[in-house]
Amino acid sequence: MHLVERKFEEADRRALVAAGLHPVLARVYAARRIHSAAELDDDFKRLLPPASLTHCERAAGLLADAIAAGKKLLIVADYDADGATACAVGVRALRQMGANVEYLVPNRFELGYGLTPELVDIAAQRRPDLLITVDNGIASVEGVERARSLGIATLITDHHLPGAELPRAECIVNPNQPGCGFASKAIAGVGVMFYVMLALRAELRKRGAYQVTAEPNLAALTDLVALGTVADVVPLDANNRILVAQGLKRLRAGKAQPGLEALLRAAGRSSAQANAFDLGFVLGPRLNAAGRLADMSLGIECLVTDDAARAANGAMELDRLNRERRRIEAEMLEQARAAAAVVAEAPGAAAAFFDPAWHQGVVGILASRLRERLHRPVICFARANEGAQSGFLRGSGRSIPGFHLRDCLDLVAKRAPGLILRFGGHAQAAGLTLREAELERFREAFSAVAEETMPREALTRTVETDGALEPAQLSLSLAQALEERIWGQGFPQPLFCDTFALESQRVVGEKHSKLKLVKDGRRLEAMRFNSLDPLPARFRAAYRLSVNEYNGLQSVQINVEHVETP
């Protein structure tokens, strides 16, 4: 483990300080390529215009025509938090704009991902006139053809990378499709759907729909957009930061959807103090638990209902499922530790794991944990039933910075045609299906491509930090200011670095270490979560400032995240 400091332009830091920012925040933002305080303005008016998203206005016209004709719309959702929030945004907005709309979400264990022909056949039983995909569809060439053969039109809203062939849908809205000049390529699926709804409201306004009735307040849906954006771990570029900031403002003001309020209460969190951590690590996992272990319809119902009691019941069930997910994950991780230890000692740029007892809904989280432990791309597989047949594996992979996992799988598929039955994803996360009998062949091919294409520097475990803090800066006020800001993928939460003297270390909660540290004569309370490893008398560590609340009193706490090793 090697700790390095992020570089920044001194001119940027000075400009931010001159604009009134705290010196530490100025340094942190300068290291994230923020040049002026204006770039931190999160006013709703600074969002990129919907017209700049290719086919967004065409989609609005298609939906407006469907609403005017009284056609039946069916949203085809995905089973993660991004797909669930995108579905909820669509259902809520379309109903407010007079549409006849329902939704359908596939069971990940039976139908797999996306608009498959099998899912189209199920959707057709509801006799829809238009299918609307959210957070999926860009790879659903066969599904769209099946819909066309049944006389059902399709509108695709997605953000995933397209393959060589695009589906023959009536309209595709995806910032990553060829020819789209939308500046925020990192927008999540929920963000794409939100943009389509903004364009639809503008189209209906142009058609005179709001001369008598009031326009729907789509800003009221930004709490859902913020949740899906953070939970999907897309890079928080300027546009995404605005969406997240707007959503957090609604949460803190007590104006969230009843389902989000109920989920926060179930987790023992306060909406008045909600931050990006709550979106990514409190609300997101509880919502995802429905898709991982049961049916994401439970999560979507929690998000679309306006009934507080129904929302509370749904939130309690999601909280229960999340506890079950954590239990299963802990068992699987324990099973994987021995294999991971062997891999860590052996050469190789990538690893693939499989256990017949593993739960299909949790292998993605397991891959993430093992990726962190091994610092190399990891794919974890579980058995799956493909319709009435058995003998298939579904895998979920996580990568490390500098290595594009989906491109790796694409190269494996090209070199070994037929080996991977289906795959898709991003640079840092991907999913795939293959036959169980082909697992060893896949392991060899995956490892070979990774060895060939992996930059050597990517395998060196380095942690970027924001440098040291002066003793006076280790304050509650700075910790509070940092927690209030927007952090996430591509715009990381500040991580500082200092050398400490260890005064004491003791075990708390069976698996955590409570520390008393000394820096420049000042004693500091610290925690090292999920680690009982003894620390030396002096050590250099990367840490975060956090707010510790006990008996109603708040204090600053240091959370040690990484300890530098020689």
Image (cartoon, helix red, strand yellow):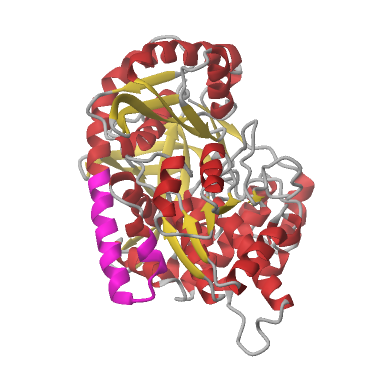
* Residue sticking out furthest to the bottom: 212
* Number of residue marks: 0
Q: Is residue 57 left or right of residue 440?
A: right
Q: Residue at x 65, y 68 (%)?
A: 65
The magenta region covers: 300-325
225 lies above or below 558:
below
Q: Is residue 311 left or right of residue 225?
A: left
Q: Nearer the viewer, residue 109 or 44?
A: 109
When asked about the image quadrant of residue 533, the answer is: top left
Q: Is residue 315 magenta?
A: yes
* Residue sticking out furthest to the right: 11
Q: Nearer the viewer, residue 288 or 112?
A: 112
Q: Position of residue 435 (x, y in %)?
A: 37, 20
Q: Residue at x 28, y 75 (%)?
A: 309
When asked about the image quadrant of residue 144, the answer is: top right
Q: Position of residue 192 (x, y in %)?
A: 61, 55
Q: Position of residue 37 (x, y in %)?
A: 73, 60
The reply to whether residue 220 is visible in this rendering is yes
Q: Residue at x 55, y 72 (%)?
A: 70
Q: Nearer the viewer, residue 270 or 150?
A: 150
Q: Is residue 107 magenta?
A: no
The reply to whether residue 472 is visible in this rendering is no
Question: Chief secondary structure of the magenta span?
Answer: helix
Q: Position of residue 222 (x, y in %)?
A: 54, 66
